[in-house]
Image: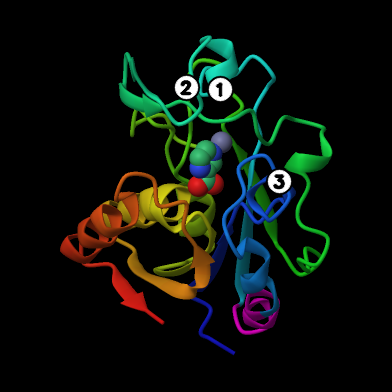
Amino acid sequence: MRPNTDALIVIDVQNDFCPGGALAVAGGDAIIPRINALLGDFPVKVLTQDWHPANHTSFAANHDAAPFSLTEMPYGPQVLWPTHCVQGTAGAEFHPTLDTHPADLVIRKGFNPGIDSYSAFFENDRSTPTGLEGYLRTRGVTAITLTGLATDFCVAYSALDAARLGFAVTVLQGACGAIDLDGSLARMLAEMRAAGVALEA
Ligand code: VGL
Ligand code: ZN
């Protein structure tokens, strides 16, 4: 068992990000057995759940635009995604093989219609908090291990924010899966490395 200062954060292991889902990551479900095993090693365990209203601004369908096209939002560039993880739908549920019972906290994100939220810590303006930082700090957490989907979006944004907040951050690449849109995986791996995030297998 890891020390009490260590948290495992499992990002968005939901049906829509797994094969057959609306925004599927290739092999997204293959990482789940390892995540289930890791949940037994960490004293602090957090799951995140991408949780959008149907009118969410990150959905291409709400802009009459093509999925995976880019738009400009008041907070910066935003990829327009296929409609995914709509609140209350099967696609938004955790994958059935993920062992959700050991989790201490489930944090939902992306619920504000006007702004996306890749990171578990802040919405995409990089300043509106989700509350996770306070939860982790009040539990005495100083080190965070990240797993889940997708490596180059929600995992990477969470890792960069956690590093900026002063946590020691490790990303277990073998327990993550990537979307890899226009070179996003290589770009985000480089950003994480530059920010001092430990990239492990
Ligand atoms: C994610 C795109 C849109 C993710 C969530 O979990 O990485 N990516 N919403
Ligand atoms: Zn989303």
Q: Position of residue 3 (x, y in %)?
A: 51, 84
**Image-based side of 93 in relation to 135, left or right:** right
Q: Which residues are magenta?
A: 34-42
* The residue positioned farthest toward the left in the image shown: 194
Note whether 179 is above or below 62 in the view shown. below
Residue 131 visible in the current orientation: no
Say left or right for 91 vs 7.
Answer: right
Dot 3, how many residues are within 10 Å of its Cα: few (below 14), some (14-19), or many (20+)? some
Query: Which numbered disc covers residue 73?
Result: none
Magenta residues, dominant SS class: helix
Work out whether residue 153 or residue 142 is closer to the camera in this orientation and state it: 153
Mark 2 or 3: in front is: 3
- Label 2 secondary element: loop
Specify the label residue 21 is tagged with.
3
The dot on residue 115 is 2
How far across and down, in percent of the image, does residue 147 sit?
A: 52, 66
Q: Residue at x 68, y 83 (%)?
A: 37
Instruction: Classify the position of ligand 2 by quadrant: top left, top right, bottom left or bottom right.
Output: top right
Classify 116 as above or below 174: above
Question: Judging from the image, what secondary structure is the residue with disc 3 in?
Answer: loop
Q: Is residue 93 visible?
A: yes
* In the depicted structure, whether residue 109 falls above or below residue 145: above
Q: CA distance from mark 1 to mark 2?
A: 11 Å
Question: Mark 2 and mark 1 in contact (Cβ < 8 Å)?
Answer: no
Label placed on residue 59: 1
Quarter of the image where one finds residue 77: top left
Q: Nearer the viewer, residue 192 or 189?
A: 189
Q: Nearer the viewer, mark 1 or mark 2?
A: 1
Across the whole image, how many numbered discs are drawn on residues?
3
Which of the two residues, 64 or 37, is positioned nearer the viewer here?
A: 64
